[in-house]
Image (cartoon, helix red, strand yellow):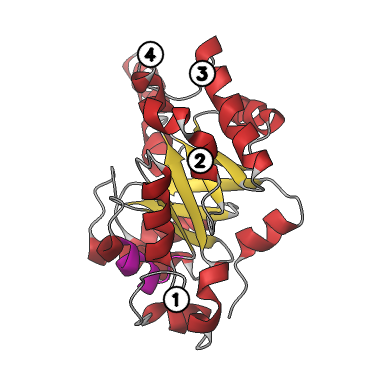
Amino acid sequence: MKPVQVRELLSQGRTILNGWSVIPGGFLAEVMSSLGWDSLTIDVQHGMISEPDMLAMLQAISTTQTTPMVRLGANDPALIGKALDAGAMGVICPLINTPEEAADFVAACRYPPLGVRSSGATRAMIYAGFDYGAHADDQVLKFAMIETRDALDRVDEIAATPGLDGLYVGPSDLSLALGGTQGFDKDEPHMLDAYRSVVEACARHDLVAGIHTASPDFAGRTAEMGFRFITLVGDFNFILAGRGQVQSTRQLLSS
């Protein structure tokens, strides 16, 4: 099976820089994956990305060395199987609140007898090799999202789930759940305590701590906290950041 670059880098002690795509389109995914990320995650939960879009984007990412990943729409075996069969080498599952839900997620990513994934990898075999079925259980990356108070309260139990590779903090939802406001780069004391709890749980169970960030400065801060899979926003945010240039240019042209 083709090595999963992110897994290899993590085994070497490296910190992963992950990109994020919410806008559908194979060419946009190809451009995004050429920017130098270690991995690029296609967001089918909150983005405008359909199943055919996901497939085209996975194919586009595969033209580069970037590891193709998918943030799932839900903890649903059918959705998980579709993403993995299409060639995602890692999946991030939203709203994992209990160890039972974490166990269900991992089971949906693994073939019997360890799990319940149905055999039929189709494109994954084309991308990763025809021995994919013999190695996928151990190679596919599995991240459970921590984004609710219930999940935070049971983070150590969730982290103890066999077969899980990491926990991924959804800062905006977690902030709302803890009585704060939406947004990323949240550094209120209670959020810093929450980050610390996730990092410590990962350390106890030999997992990778992941998080979503919105700026290089805060990404660096999370690395200092112990996070090793760090997302720096994505395509939608990069396009919105261009508003300043549009407005500046309009002012120049109007003067």
Image location (x, y in percent) of residue 234: 44, 41
Residue indicated by mark 2: 157
Tell me if label 4 and label 1 are in contact, CB under 8 Å: no
Residue indicated by mark 4: 180
Tell which circle, 2 or 3, labels the residue nearer the N-terminal end.
Answer: 2
Q: Nearer the viewer, residue 205 or 140?
A: 205
Q: CA separation, marks 1 and 3? A: 39 Å
The kind of residue tagged 1 is Pro
| Tag shown at residue 43 | none
Q: Residue at x 38, y 80 (%)?
A: 121
Tell which circle, 4 or 2, labels the residue nearer the N-terminal end.
Answer: 2
Q: Please, what secondary structure does the residue beneath circle 3 have?
A: helix
Q: Main secondary structure of the magenta part?
A: helix
Q: CA separation, marks 4 and 1? A: 43 Å
The kind of residue tagged 3 is Met
Tell which circle, 1 or 3, labels the residue nearer the N-terminal end.
Answer: 1
Q: Nearer the viewer, mark 4 or mark 1?
A: 1
**Where is residue 30, by image quadrant?**
bottom left
In the image, which residues are magenta?
80-88
Q: CA separation, marks 3 and 4? A: 9 Å
Residue indicated by mark 1: 113
Q: Residues within 10 Å of mark 1 (few under 14, many from 20)?
A: few
The kind of residue tagged 4 is Gly
Outermost residue, bottom side: 130
Q: Nearer the viewer, mark 4 or mark 2?
A: 2
The kind of residue tagged 2 is Glu
Image quadrant occupied by the C terminus: top left
